[in-house]
Amino acid sequence: MKLFICSLRVSVCLALTAALVSMASAAERKPNVIVIYSDDQGTVDLGCYGSKDLETPHLDKLAARGVRFTQMYSPSAICSASRAGLLTGRFPARAGVPGNVSSQKGKAGMPGEEVTIAEMMKAAGYATGHIGKWHLGYTPDTMPNAQGFDYSFGHMGGCIDNYSHFFYWNGPNRHDLWRNGEEIWEDGVFFGDSMVREAKGFIEKNQEKPFFVYWAINFPHYPLQGKEKWRKHYAHLESPRRMYNAFVSTMDEMIGEVLGKVDELGLREDTLVIFQSDHGHSTEERTFFGGGNPGPYRGAKGCLFEGGIRVPSIVSLPGRIPQGETRDQMAVGCDWLPTIAEIAGVAKPKRKLDGLSIAKMIQSGSAPSPHKGSFYWQLGGGKGAQWVVREGNWKLLGNPKDRSDMAPLGPDDKLFLVDMAADIKELNNLAKKHPDVVKRLTARQRELMNDIGTK
């Protein structure tokens, strides 16, 4: 009997010890991180941003469970550069990607010495996964598995047909679907469904340890291939809005499926979710010359007016950050790397970062932007590169282009100065009225170009 009691006591002690260890491990576990990066999405193209003709219930729910930004900027107005800025926390030009990289196999992209969010998280013990679009290099040394990702599924170039998985837009036509550096074939399978399957699978497989997922959705980038359900739903709208909306709502439904898996696994309150567009909407011929909505802003994809770089963005971590709030302070996609590092408690890369943590700003609407209204954008290289220096309410654009054709640009507009407090539409060039401001910001631009090593 005494032996039985002793054995019982030992069993109880072991069980209590195991429970305490389990609780301690849960308390010490670092948060999971999911970054969802949409492609060519207009500034106000979500229901929670006031869209009246677009249904996005899942992203609206994400905003209700988190913080929505009204002055979030992409690192660039073009795909590859924006992704380089996001993943490295650096000016895209500093990261070696001032513009788009090639979509052709065998062409390099972002230099291998750049340190990505994935490499930062992997060093901290995270499982790291890339799902979707890459567009940062098409060689073994510049594809996802060489840039910190344990697992990768998706396409390496700028876009694909979502059923054949071929790149058709700049010959020769070529197949582009890869898993961990090996070409795979899923003929006729909708790529959106494949991304959902892969994201859910990666999350479920790694649910017992912290994970980082970079889900670079290639929607609503052309070709606009929304599902039949949504094509019927928006059939009453004019072209190209109806095709664009069907694709955005298809994307929203996909996001709902993946976040539903996070909820199902009981991980939602331990998972930081970031949603953001890579830049503004496209007005290219291949997207029927538009479809996206920039709201009141001038510009679109490929230019540095507000419509090209001001993007929808949401962050959510229930129980850790506020819910149902908005932030009007300025932030930039380069800020996510240091912000993730601070929230997750991991070490930042030991190199110069241009992004700054916005963790305090996320927590409080009264906290100032760490940038104090200042930042630098550069699109392309050489003397003809587009650039912007922002200093408070002053915004100086160099070599501006307007893909929205909201207003003409003439020879006198090579330097275009805007007072953002008075002219949110950026229609009035004040360069001649404020030569002192132009001189100061031009000098700052030269200083920054020298600093990042571009000429």
Image (spheres, grey):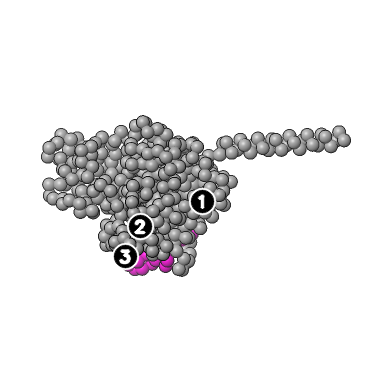
Range of magenta residues: 163-179
User: Which residue does the numbered mark 2 point to in the structure image?
Assistant: 245
Q: Residue at x 84, y 37 (%)?
A: 4
- Give the alpha-carbon distance from disc 2 to disc 1, as whole Å: 22 Å
Q: Residue at x 46, y 66 (%)?
A: 189
Q: Is residue 379 above or below residue 172?
A: above
State which mark lies toward you, 1 or 3.
Answer: 1
Asked if the residue under mark 3 is in contact with the one under mark 2, i.e. CB atoms within 8 Å, the reply is no
User: Which residue does the numbered mark 1 point to in the structure image?
Assistant: 260
User: Which residue does the numbered mark 3 point to in the structure image?
Assistant: 170
Amino acid at the residue labelled 3:
Asn
Q: Residues within 10 Å of mark 1 (few under 14, many from 20)?
A: some
Q: Quadrant of residue 63?
A: top left
- Give the alpha-carbon distance from disc 2 to disc 3, as whole Å: 26 Å
Q: Residue 82 placed where, x, y %? A: 34, 49
Which quadrant is the N terminus positioned in? Answer: top right
Query: Residue 372 — which label?
Result: none
Quick one: SS at disc 2? helix
